């Protein structure tokens, strides 16, 4: 992880309306400033609901706040008669750098298959967005196949046809650890993240594997982040619940201190 810039990403899910978003981002910014957080030691990204993105973008721009912005999903299509869908082009226009793809909640509640995920990865890259590709096993998968088999298979499909110089981020999120309070151990996260790096190497080449950031996600908190970040193949965290609590998220960002 030494040569890769750590990424701490906050997935707000369906929380915080555009007014709450402004208050939250300002408070987070000032909390980090008060703690004299060095902006270039770790990249911070927030993933608000679509309806907040314009407001948050304006705030980041006006106050010169160095958080990266991302969408929580995007359409496989670029434009047209797709009611309710959001194009990657729209996200890019609002300065989004990232887009989360294949979160387990999308896979479960919106029946997103590995093929849909792969099409969304392609759409993101087509619009200059870095996909944050989420993979992970359910408790049942874990029992039947062990930890790595399902995330490895999911990532293989997601990276099909992706160019070797593409900017992608991988997030290993065991489904049983998401929102459960029961995080994986740092060793469990390391074991799977190392295997996912091998997939990146096989699909995109050694250089891409060396540069691609692989995050752990699932009940990350200020109390356990440092353990994950000590692992050589864990380059950051995708954080759900704790990303909505200013002091917690700020402490996660400042995990080295
Ligand atoms: C997530 O949903 O991406 C996540 C990691 O959630 P939590 O941190 O709440 O487990």
Image (spheres, rainbow, N blue to C red):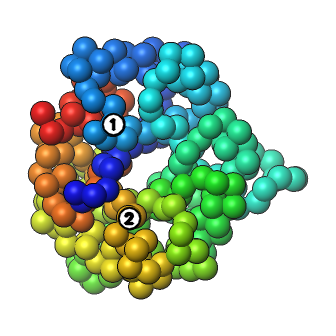
How far is disc 1 from disc 2 in space, using C-alphas? 17 Å
Q: Which residue is drawn at 50% across and 16% down?
A: 63
Does 142 appear above or below 97?
Answer: below
- Location of residue 1 by image quarter: bottom left
Task: Say left or right for 80 vs 87.
Answer: right
Q: Is residue 203 above or below residue 122?
A: below
Residue 238: give x, y in percent of width and height.
35, 48
Give the camera-side residue of 199 and 104.
199
Dot placed on the residue nearer the N-terminal end, 1 or 2: 1
- Kindly identify the residue that appears in the image at 16 percent across and 60 percent down: 231
Q: Is residue 192 above or below residue 124?
A: below
Residue 10, how many percent across, how many down?
39, 39
Q: Residue 211 bears which disc, if any?
A: 2
Relative to residue 102, is residue 137 drawn left or right? left
Q: In which quarter of the image is residue 255?
A: top left
Which structural element holds mark 2?
helix
- Please name the residue that numbered disc 1 is placed on: 40
Which element is circle 1 on? helix
Q: Nearer the viewer, residue 226 or 65?
A: 65
Residue 43, given in percent of the width and then of the height, sits at: 37, 41
User: Dots 1 and 2: beta carbons under 8 Å?
Assistant: no
């Amino acid at each position: 992880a030494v040569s890769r810039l750590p990424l701490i990403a906050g997935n707000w899910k369906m929380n915080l309306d555009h007014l709450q978003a402004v208050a939250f981002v300002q408070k987070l910014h000032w909390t980090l400033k008060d703690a004299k957080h060095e902006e270039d030691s770790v990249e911070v990204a927030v993933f608000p609901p679509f309806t907040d993105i314009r407001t948050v973008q304006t705030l980041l721009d006006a106050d010169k706040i160095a958080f990266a912005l991302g969408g929580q999903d995007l359409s496989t299509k670029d434009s047209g008669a797709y009611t309710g869908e959001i194009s990657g082009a729209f996200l890019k226009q609002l300065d989004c750098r990232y887009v989360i793809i294949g979160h387990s909640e999308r896979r479960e509640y919106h029946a997103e298959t590995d093929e849909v995920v792969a099409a969304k990865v392609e759409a993101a890259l087509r619009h200059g967005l870095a996909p944050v590709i989420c993979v992970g096993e359910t408790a049942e998968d874990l029992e039947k196949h062990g930890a790595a088999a399902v995330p490895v298979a999911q990532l293989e499909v997601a990276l099909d046809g992706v160019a070797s110089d593409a900017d992608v981020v991988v997030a290993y999120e065991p489904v049983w650890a998401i929102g459960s309070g029961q995080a994986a151990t740092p060793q469990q996260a390391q074991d799977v993240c190392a295997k996912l790096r091998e997939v990146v190497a096989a699909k995109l080449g050694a250089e891409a594997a060396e540069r691609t950031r692989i995050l752990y996600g699932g009940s990350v908190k200020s109390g356990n982040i440092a353990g994950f970040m000590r692992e050589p193949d864990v380059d950051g965290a995708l954080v759900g619940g704790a990303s909505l609590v200013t002091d917690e998220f700020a402490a996660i960002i400042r995990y080295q201190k």
